[in-house]
Amino acid sequence: RVEMLEAQAAAIGIALRSIPTTWEEMEGKLNEELSALRGAGFSGVVFGDIHLADVRAWYEDRVTSAGLEHVEPIWGEPPHLLLQEYVATGGRAVITCVDLAKLDAAWLGRVIDERFAADIATTGVDACGENGEYHSYAIAGPIFPKQVAWTTGERRLDGGFVQLDLIEESP
């Protein structure tokens, strides 16, 4: 939902720049946007990859080809420590998608908090979901002057994934 991205950006206090695309168009649109960023005076792009070398290499190639610096500040950090730090600093997120081959559907809709960090540690999956075990939507943290207000919407099954729609809730 675009509304949830807008709510997240508003809660952080930043502008949202959204570029609709398809998988087939993504690389071309990314290259155009990277060129536009360089033209606007940006010097680099920051990513949050942790340990997937193929993903990092794909983005790094495109970013550096556009004449920008590719920055990966948490690269190589242990995922369980990153999750603990995220939670300890007030970070909160809602699990919006679960790969049913890796986790049970009961994880869907959970808030990432201290209990989540303890529970995910017992599963054997990547604590940050770096391998697609789960996807999340950030609702609170140090960069959020206010938390994103949300409520749960429809749950749906898509192949081997269960997904949760989040709906903006008026505070």
Image (cartoon, rainbow, N blue to C red):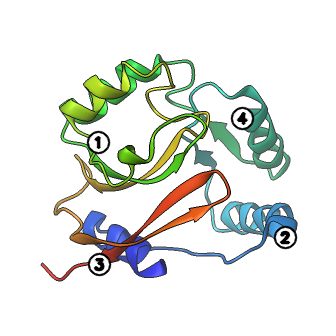
Q: Is residue 93 left or right of residue 155?
A: left
* First in sequence: mark 1 vs mark 2: 2
Q: Which residue is mark 4?
A: 56
- Amino acid type, label 4: Arg
* First in sequence: mark 3 vs mark 1: 1
Question: Is 47 drawn above or below residue 41 in the view shown?
Answer: above
- The span from disc 1 to disc 4 (Cα, nearest Å) is 25 Å
Q: Nearer the viewer, mark 1 or mark 2?
A: 1
- The span from disc 2 to disc 3 (Cα, nearest Å) is 29 Å
Q: Which residue is mark 1?
A: 112
Q: Which residue is mark 3?
A: 168
Disc on res. 25: 2
Q: Residues within 10 Å of mark 4 (few under 14, many from 20)?
A: some
* First in sequence: mark 2 vs mark 3: 2
Task: Check disc 1 and report its element: helix, strand or loop.
Answer: loop
* First in sequence: mark 1 vs mark 4: 4
Question: Is 135 drawn above or below residue 74 in the view shown?
Answer: below
Marks 3 and 1 in Cβ contact (< 8 Å): no
* First in sequence: mark 4 vs mark 3: 4
Where's residue 106, x and y in %?
36, 46
- Amino acid type, label 2: Glu
